Amino acid sequence: MERLRQSIDREKIALHEEVKARNSALQAQIAPHFIHNVLYLISIAAQEGKNGVVSDMCKHLSDSLRYIVSSPYAHVTLTEELEHTRHYLSLVQQNYEEDLEWEIEAEKSARQVQLPRLVIQPFVENCIEHAFSNTNPPWRIKITVKQFNGLWAVEIKDNGDGFPPGKIREILDNLRETDSEHAGDQNLYSSIGNMGIVNSVHRLKLMYKNRLFINLFNHSGEEHGATVQIIGSLAKDFY
């Protein structure tokens, strides 16, 4: 019985380390993607001679880089992840000015929620890059965080074009079919066409397993845009 117990413990430790390694590999893909896009925005402001704007953008980038490289693979609170997202939105707003409006509304309970680093900002970046192509400004993004009945929920809402016909079903079907064993398959990123979102969902699934729910939907009626919902358990038995 003692040998069996030791064998089970070794198996648990090995599985834990394997999942941490997968999460680390996925997270390592996100940081260069983020930095590349931000530097592109800063270069545009520099070409337009907006010296003050460039200075502000570099400050927000500096704060973001400090967040990314500080214990990069340790869990963070949802509050910290939202602060990083604020820096990103403040940075891109320097480029879009009054055309972009954003709001983050979070309860204090967000401090209790633990997440992998860099999982909320990619959803917001997706809005910036894809949601407003055919929508007149002002472009609006609202992030709402709530907690209820042992669950936490993040809702990312925009007033953009919405998902193209069939895209939501394609994304959800692909996410449903891909478990953590296939999280590193680059073909999945190209099939869904959005590396940031897929990467974030896979890392959340690695951490929360079957205690995570993702939903995407277009708004109905006269309300334009789309919403992404991320709902997870407050339980802390991660990995």
Image (cartoon, grey):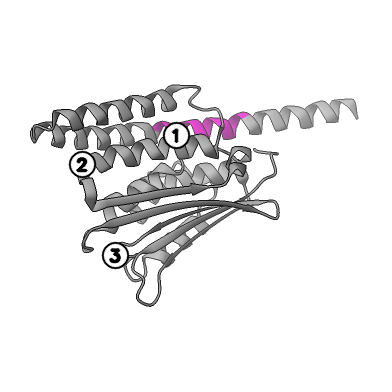
Q: Which residue was labeled with disc 2?
A: 95
Going from N to C along the chain, the mark reached first, 1 or 2, is 1
| Residue positioned 35% across, 75% down in the render | 222
**Quarter of the image that includes the C terminus:** top right
Residue at which label 3 appears: 161
- Disc 2/disc 3 C-alpha distance (Å): 20 Å
Query: Between 123 and 109, which is closer to the camera in this rendering?
Result: 109
- Residue identifier under label 1: 27
In this rendering, the label closer to the viewer, 1 or 2: 2
Looking at the rendering, the stretch of residues picked out in magenta corresponds to 17-28
- Nearer to me, 140 or 129: 140
Q: Quadrant of the N terminus?
A: top right
Task: Say few, some or many: other residues with alpha carbon within 10 Å of mark 3 (under 14 / 14 to 19 / 20 or more).
Answer: some
Q: Is residue 48 in the magenta section?
A: no
Q: Amino acid at mark 2?
A: Asn
Observer able to see residue 41: yes
- Foreground mark, 1 or 3, reads 3
Q: Residue at left 35%, top 65%?
A: 225
